[in-house]
Amino acid sequence: MHKKKEERMRDVKVAIVCDPLVSGCNLDRYVQNIVEAFPNSEIFTAYSDEEYLEKLVEGKSVHTTFMQKLPKRKALEELYYILQPFAYRRLKFDDYHIVISISKGFGKCINSKNLKHITVCIEPPTFLWENRRKKYGEMNEMKKFLLNIYSYIFNSFLRKKWQEIDIKAMKACTSVLANSEIGRKKILKHYGTNSVVIYPPVDVRSLNSFKKVNRKENWFLYLGSIEKGVGLDFVIKASVKSEQPLKVVGLGDDMDGMVDLVRKLNAKGYIKFLGKVSDIEKHDLLTRAKALIFSMKDSHFSVIPIEANASGTPVIAYKKSAAFETISTDNPKTGIFFEKYSVTELAKILKNFKSERYNPDNCKKQADNFASEIFVYKLQNYVKDVLQNI
């Protein structure tokens, strides 16, 4: 009976609606695992690019809107936000049993009519609710000029209008999935809507099957973007203060600033920037590191601490970050948290950190709780509950 029910769930025809599927959107894990849960599905988005589509499920067509034909979509991304709510409303979902949207923007702003609509809210749109401004970086003068116009219009009346659209879209959903307890609280704060937490899929299997290391090496690892606000400057200062070597993997607009900081601290011998690395190199670094340092303060769910555990490596993280939900401090012990976001406290932890106190197998077992298979199983059961009459 259970097997027949599972087969029937896999036959459910699902419309998977996503924010624009472009480089940097990081939706491939979600899409791939939802397709695994519901093979009889199709993918919809405002627009996409070929580079990103290579990451998606082979043989799955992607339905786009009129925005697919617009020029310079990457360069004019912010200006094209204006068209996204209208574009998503024009999508049609005839002959589908249910819609599952995956969104941290306007992807949930669809017209699902009488269909059930589950939205996976990665996070409420930060450009609407947290007033995060786009950094100019290396933009040319024309784009700076266009963004200044956009910012003026946005702050004058678009923000309020878009917030109304965003709230209305959320309220129209049959049910809402959050990716963490932090995410659930943000959804309740901004929308007044309750949600259910299902942690995102993590490719644990390929990570914990990576080569075993007989011993940890004497350096810590930072893995992530190099932008202002991620706390890398904080990690560098703590590493220097504790005289502990640090390897930094990642790229971002604040790379020059971090290199300057290392120079000012006269700490070139302690800090090594590795830039962008391949997946194999990343796995190798995660396996050999003494520990991963996760420095985000108010982060939503991140796969990085789980990837570290899946590689047999413990994590050092801020207690108020989403890593608190994924790292265990006892039975099994897979990491440690610092209570205060201070260089002195982190430096003390780094100075006294002992790798031998953390069993690699326990770290891997903890990561197994967030494996893709768990996500697929929970999502199938959740959809079954929503479609009670299937």
Image (cartoon, rainbow, N blue to C red):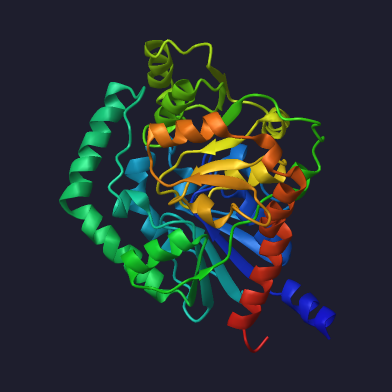
Q: Position of residue 208 (x, y in %)?
A: 77, 44
Quadrant of res 41: bottom right
Residue furthest toward the left? 156
Q: Position of residue 111 (x, y in %)?
A: 44, 71
Quadrant of res 5: bottom right
Disc tally is 0
Q: If the image is split into quadrants, where does the C terminus sit?
A: bottom right
- Seen at 47% across and 71% down, the residue is 195
Q: If the image is split into quadrants, where does the N terminus sit?
A: bottom right
Nearer to the camera, 246 or 58: 246
Residue furthest toward the bottom? 389
Residue furthest toward the front? 352
Quadrant of res 284: top right
Question: Image height check: is 278 above or below 387?
Answer: above
Q: Position of residue 171 (x, y in %)?
A: 38, 74
Q: Position of residue 33 (x, y in %)?
A: 68, 58
Evaluate whether residue 227 shows in this view: no
Question: Image height check: is 364 above or below 228?
Answer: below
